[in-house]
Amino acid sequence: MNNAEQIKETIARIFPDVETVICYQQGFDGLHATPYFISIPEQVNKLIWNPLCAQNLTSYLPSIKKKVGIVVKGCDSRTIIQYLQEGLIDRAKVVIIGVPCTGVISVKKVLREIGHQPVVDVVFDDNGNIVVKTQKGEKRLAIADVCPDKCTTCQYPTPLVYDHLIGEPIASNKPKEDVYKDIREFDAKTLEEKRAYWEKEFERCIRCYACRNACPMCICQDSCIAETREPHWISQRLSLQEKFMFHMIHAAHLAGRCVECGECERVCPMDIPVAKLKKKINAEMKELFNYETGVNPDDKPPMYTFNVDEAKIKEHKL
Amino acid sequence: MSDTGYLPKEKIKDFLKELAKDAVVYAPCLEGDIVLFRPFSEERTLCLDRPANTPPKSVIYPQSETLFAFQYKKAPEDHQKMSVELKADIGVPNMVIFGARPCDAKGFRIYDRVFIETNTPDPYYRKRRENTLIVTLSCAAPSPGCFCVAVGGGPAHKEGSDVMMTELEGGYVIEPVTEKGRAILGKHVIEDGKPYLKDAQHVQAKAHDEVRNPFAPDELPKISQSLFNFDGFWEQVVGKCVSCGACTYLCPTCYCFNITDEQGIGSGERVRSWDACMFFHFTLEASGHNPRPTKFQRFKNRVGHKFIYYPEKYEGVIACCGCGRCIRYCPVNVDISEIVNYLKDTHQELHWASSRKEGTQPTVGSTKDE
Ligand code: SF4
Ligand code: SF4
Ligand code: SF4
Ligand code: SF4
């Protein structure tokens, strides 16, 4: 029995206990999956499970008050653990169906490979490839080549928390040292280079706030200072300054909270690598506090606590 | 002079340079992996093989613009007395939008009715619109999600354009649409296009047949009021929406704006900027009351504005040109054509009502059904 069938069976079993289950169904074309909220077991026939199921569905959890079931991959489970650390959800009200994951698809990367042609058909073969058919022909791409960056260094392919596990656990074969390799490479740039890099990227930002709204850990939502007039920290002008300000605030509020799910980057219609900022801060958090987000429900995010004597912060002793 | 022109592909840059002599030319340019309308220059890479990620709307209707600057002045004789000095500058250069798609151009017609064809025309929009020549490229094939033919448009629909170009193997056939557009035929690099006109029309007709029509063919979608006003419907179809501004900001027909005074010390500017009905703050009132506090109500407004309120006000014209951007770039794949399709069917209300009770989704009228 494949994973999709097992997920369906599990959902059917948990149903009297939950009111809704959040999973995936086919989106508007063959290359897109879309969230699927089901409320009676019969609806599971439209459920899909394949590498297109990249979205982190856990973002919906804090806003749902009833008892829900949810399908999560390894990386998604970190969000749930972070929620638990911060008291944002009630564990008793979530039934977690964990699915060990071998990597998902970045639609943006596939589109780049197929020259943004409309897709006619998409299939997955047994050797880890996605085969995309367009009017111009067929393209076979290794999933490993078109996965989101996070998959290339994934440490937790098997969910860290679950009530039902589909299939066998998978261990990561990616070196732990590589997780922040991209950040260390970026760090090597000069200040001017970094500034030029971000100016070029943020110049495209249209302030649609998709990155914020899709982020599971952005919890201010309707009270975000990017839009409030009180306090009035950011104006409605479209200048680079305002865009920078918004992104710096987003990043700062995610310090030691970002679970590196990459949603902010996945959803950005302007292709801005916004997750990099948060990953950079997480790298510092690891360095300073030896803290990694979303791995242990009993941890406390460093910004939620205060120690007079921090082992790695000397500044206050000056 | 012939009525049709022809621009050989190898002369396209010369053509843009010629246009740029007396206008700022905005053209779709590649930036990383996305396509944006930018003031064209030699260093940029023109990209005409797919519609731009963003429509050219900001050229005529900027995302943020200063309406006027203000400055408080103390009277020299009496410091208790203050006056305010206002300065408005609507100087706009001549502009060309090159390589818009027919849906993009049609979008400007949606704005024209609101900002120009009214008792109180908007001088900012009008000035830019008048100073801009729109050179549209007809679509040779649909892009993912688009459905222009279902909302009164088409891959070679001419409304809103000054010139229509159609791509052939070696060049572009150029058909002027307006008087303003005719001037293009006099440009140096433009050759006689008459011999190619038939081929161009063939390309246009073929493309038209390829665009999907999610609604009943040959009629504009009519929305069932009772279903539209049924909350349960919205809760089921847009539960996944994250209430961001991607769909509205990328839409060539969305025009809602906010007006804010951006204050400095003793001076400031009144700014008009795009707003999005999907944001919580859009309808937040000074009292703190918000008539549309949920994403369901906000999404309902987005569909209502495009498919009910605007058509009611403007002779049945639907304020969606079917460009498909909101579908392509939505973070969670909300598909407005699918939702409108559900809403079309007057007989489905009961079905939705009972399905809500039983917790099912409807199985009729769905574009995603097996
Ligand atoms: S999603 Fe992209 S364009 Fe939208 S606000 Fe975020 S960074 Fe800017
Ligand atoms: S900031 Fe980005 S990567 Fe981090 S939790 Fe939010 S969406 Fe995920
Ligand atoms: S429909 Fe999509 S793009 Fe529009 S607000 Fe909802 S999530 Fe954002
Ligand atoms: S509503 Fe969507 S499809 Fe219609 S014009 Fe706007 S972006 Fe395009």
Image: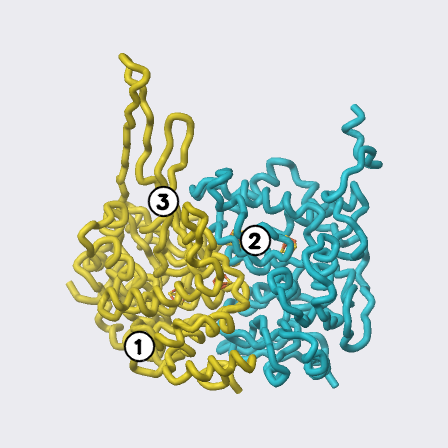
Q: Is residue B32 left or right of residue A185?
A: left
Residues flagged by tags 3 and 2 on a common chain: no
Q: Which residue is mark 3?
A: B259
Q: Exactly how many numbered labels are in the figure? A: 3
Circle 3 sits in a helix, a strand or a loop, which is it? Answer: strand
Residue at image position (47%, 54%) is B280
Disc 1 vs disc 2: Cβ atoms closer than 8 Å?
no
Q: Which residue is mark 1?
A: B220
User: Is the residue B168 above or below the residue A126 in the image?
Assistant: above
**What is the distance, in whole Å, between disc 1 and disc 2 at their CAs?**
36 Å
Residue at image position (62%, 46%) is A251
**What is the distance, in whole Å, between disc 3 and disc 2 at their CAs?**
23 Å
User: Is the residue B205 above or below the residue A315 in the image?
Assistant: below
Q: Nearer the viewer, residue A88 or B241?
A: A88
Task: Look at label 2 and name its amino acid.
Answer: Arg
Where residue B305 sits in the image (x, y, percent)?
34, 64
Task: Look at label 3 and name its amino acid.
Answer: Ile
Q: Residues within 10 Å of mark 1 (few under 14, many from 20)?
A: some
Q: Which residue is mark 2?
A: A212
Asked whether the viewer can see residue B142, the reply is: no
Hey, which residue is sitting farthest top in the picture? B77
Q: Which chain is yellow?
A: B
* Chain ID of residue with mark 3: B
Q: Residues within 10 Å of mark 2 (few under 14, many from 20)?
A: many
Where residue B321 sits in the image (x, y, percent)?
34, 67
Residues flagged by tags 3 and 1 on a common chain: yes
**Which of the two discs, 3 and 1, labels the residue nearer the N terminus?**
1
Q: Is residue B122 left or right of residue A265?
A: left
In which quadrant is the N terminus of chain A drawn?
bottom right
Q: Is residue B114 left or right of residue B286?
A: left
